[in-house]
Amino acid sequence: MAYWLFKTEPDDFSINDLKNSPKQTTMWEGVRNYQARNFIRDNIKQGDLVMLYHSSCKHVGVVGIATVTRNAYPDPSQFDLSHAYYDAKATKVKPRWFVVDVTYKKHLTKLVSLRAIKANDTVSDIALKKSGRLSIMPVTESDWREILKMAEN
């Protein structure tokens, strides 16, 4: 099992939207960054745990936990001419973009802010501290435990 952080803008899709989805599950679509795509396609597996992180909002930070419940498969939106994520260069034989399904697990007791993560020297390997632009990033087990501990204090 591996640990991940997935960013989402709550005005588009929040942890509450995930919780209220049918079977509390959704396809994690719309990733259009090659490094994040490669994580989805090559590394993220069913059973992995995900920290959901709200970004581009008033209260930025980790808000909850989800589980990956389906391995990577081609993002269907890349083939849909009417969809915002349509990609003319993608084909069914050679898809460019991939998704995984995630299922809601829980809200954190309290939000763990980006400021708090950056201020905590025990959280040492997370890419959020260096570059906040990546929408999907791995989280070490020690960073995972420390961020969860921060949510409880």
Image (cartoon, rainbow, N blue to C red):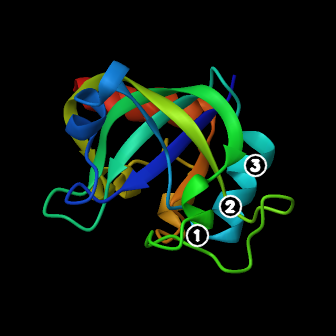
* Foreground residue among 143 and 85: 85
Q: Where is residue 89? Give x, y as percent.
A: 74, 79
Q: Residue at x 45, y 72 (%)?
A: 82
Give how far apart the Cα atoms at labels 3 and 2 are.
Answer: 8 Å
Circle 2: residue type: Trp
In the rendered view, would you say 37 is above or below 56?
A: above
Say if mark 1 contacts mark 2, CB within 8 Å: yes
In the rendered view, would you say 52 is above or below 74?
A: above
Binning the other alpha carbons within 10 Å of mark 2 as few (below 14), some (14 to 19) or many (20 upward) gives many
Image quadrant occupied by the N terminus: top right
Give how far apart the Cα atoms at labels 1 and 2 are.
Answer: 7 Å
Give the number of the mark in front: 3 or 2.
2
Disc on the earlier residue, 1 or 2: 1
Give how far apart the Cα atoms at labels 1 and 3 are.
Answer: 12 Å
Q: Which residue is mark 2?
A: 97
Residue at disc 2, secondary structure: loop
Q: Where is residue 41? Give x, y as percent.
A: 75, 48
* Residue 111, image quadrant: top left
Circle 1: residue type: Arg
Q: Residue at x 71, y 30 (%)?
A: 45
Q: Which residue is mark 3?
A: 41
Image quadrant occupied by the C terminus: top left
Q: Is residue 147 left or right of residue 44?
A: left
Which label sits on residue 32? 1
